Image (tube, rainbow, N blue to C red):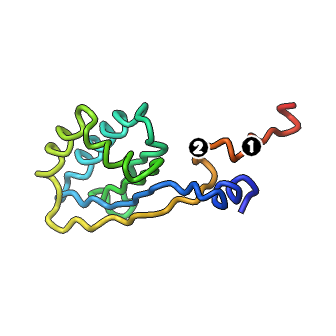
């Protein structure tokens, strides 16, 4: 574990994460992916949303995977009140397959690509930046 991630983890500042698979009906994965990308766009400047990534299954283009990282569970729950989100959920529901799996809830520890919003973690500069 790199020094910054270790300090972030030890500081007890774990983030709320979700990793879920949404299975679209056959041939509807592209449409579902577009709906979720519109949701990602709405999350762009939402307070508390650190990461919202939409992925398509390499072996199953009708399986759409969403990875989310939030400052807290409360921030995630509040996201359902963002204008436009409920409308996107309504659009997505009819194209979901009947057998959509439950997502996985995670306590995010940190890592490359994750924006850490904490004063407990110092900024690292390289010799090139000095």
Q: Is residue 29 above or below residue 34?
A: below
Mark 1–mark 2 distance (CA, rounded to whole Å): 12 Å
Residue 9 falls left or right of residue 63? right
Element at badge 1? loop
Q: Position of residue 21 (x, y in %)?
A: 32, 61
**Which residue appears at 74% of the width and 58% of the height?**
2
**Which residue appears at 42% of the width and 54% of the height?**
67
Q: Specify the quadrant of the image occupied by residue 20.
A: bottom left
Q: Is residue 120 or residue 114 the one in the foreground?
A: 120
Residue 46 falls left or right of residue 100? right
Q: Is residue 46 or residue 65 the one in the foreground?
A: 46
Give yes or no for contact between labels 1 and 2 (Cβ–Cβ under 8 Å): no
Q: Position of residue 78 (x, y in %)?
A: 31, 43
Q: Position of residue 45 (x, y in %)?
A: 43, 31
Which image quarter is the C terminus in? top right
Residue 125 falls left or right of residue 35? right
The residue labelled by disc 2 is 115
Element at badge 2? loop
Q: Specify the quadrant of the image occupied by residue 110.
A: bottom right
Q: Residues within 10 Å of mark 2 (few under 14, many from 20)?
A: few
Residue 80 falls left or right of residue 109? left
Which labelled disc corresponds to residue 122? Answer: 1
């Amino acid at each position: 574990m790199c020094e910054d991630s270790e300090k972030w983890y030890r500081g007890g500042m774990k983030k709320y994460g979700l990793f879920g698979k949404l299975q679209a009906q056959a041939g509807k994965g592209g449409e579902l992916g577009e709906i979720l990308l519109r949701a990602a766009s709405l999350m762009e400047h939402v307070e508390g949303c650190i990461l919202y990534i939409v992925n398509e299954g390499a072996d199953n283009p009708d399986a759409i995977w969403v990875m989310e990282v939030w400052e807290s569970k409360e921030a995630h729950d509040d996201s359902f009140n963002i204008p436009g989100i409920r409308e996107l959920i309504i659009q997505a529901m009819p194209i979901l397959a009947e057998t959509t799996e439950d997502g996985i809830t995670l306590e995010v520890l940190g890592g490359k690509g994750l924006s850490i919003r904490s004063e407990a973690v110092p900024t690292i500069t390289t010799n090139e930046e000095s």
